[in-house]
Image: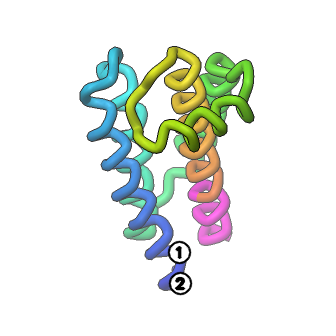
Amino acid sequence: MSKSWKIFFGSCSLIFLLFGYWQINDPDPQLWVPVYLIASITSGFAFFGRFNVNILVTLTFIYLVGAIFFWPDNIFGWIGQEWQQKDLSMKTNAMEINREFFGLVISAIVFAMEAIKGRSQKL
């Protein structure tokens, strides 16, 4: 595996750890901390060249279904609120739903990239 992929997966692992840490003060950390820890662990395995494609594909679909469940009502309004607020505090429930949606989508995209990279290594 190339050095750039290792850097990408290692960075994702650290970022997901940070996301998990930020979720500790969330209203429902028992759900969101494991969500990001799973993403961090799979990225860590990918960093070391270990891929379980079946698990990664399954996680991709699970996280995408979860993202559909948290589909935001107004994405562009949320982005405007975040820019105006200029901090990470949650002012509305819609902000929390939008952040959870995007967290799941980002995780699913990384899982898919890991699955594709793992599949290409096996071929």
In this rendering, the answer to whether 25 lies above or below 44 is above
- In the figure, is residue 7 to the left or right of 122? left
Q: Nearer the viewer, residue 8 or 45?
A: 8
Amino acid found under the numbered disc labelled 1: Trp
Residue 39: give x, y in percent of width and height: 44, 45
The residue to which callout 1 is attached is 5
**Residue 2 shows which numbered tag?**
2
Query: From this viewpoint, is residue 32 visible?
Result: yes
- In the figure, is residue 53 to the left or right of 88? right
Residue reaching furthest front?
84
Amino acid found under the numbered disc labelled 2: Ser
**Which region of the structure is painted magenta?**
114-123
In this rendering, the answer to whether 12 lies above or below 92 is below
Instruction: Give the image quarter of residue 57.
Output: top right
Q: Which residue appears at 39% of the width and 27% of the height?
A: 32
Residue 7: give x, y in percent of width and height: 45, 75
Q: Which residue appears at 63% of the width and 49% of the height?
A: 109
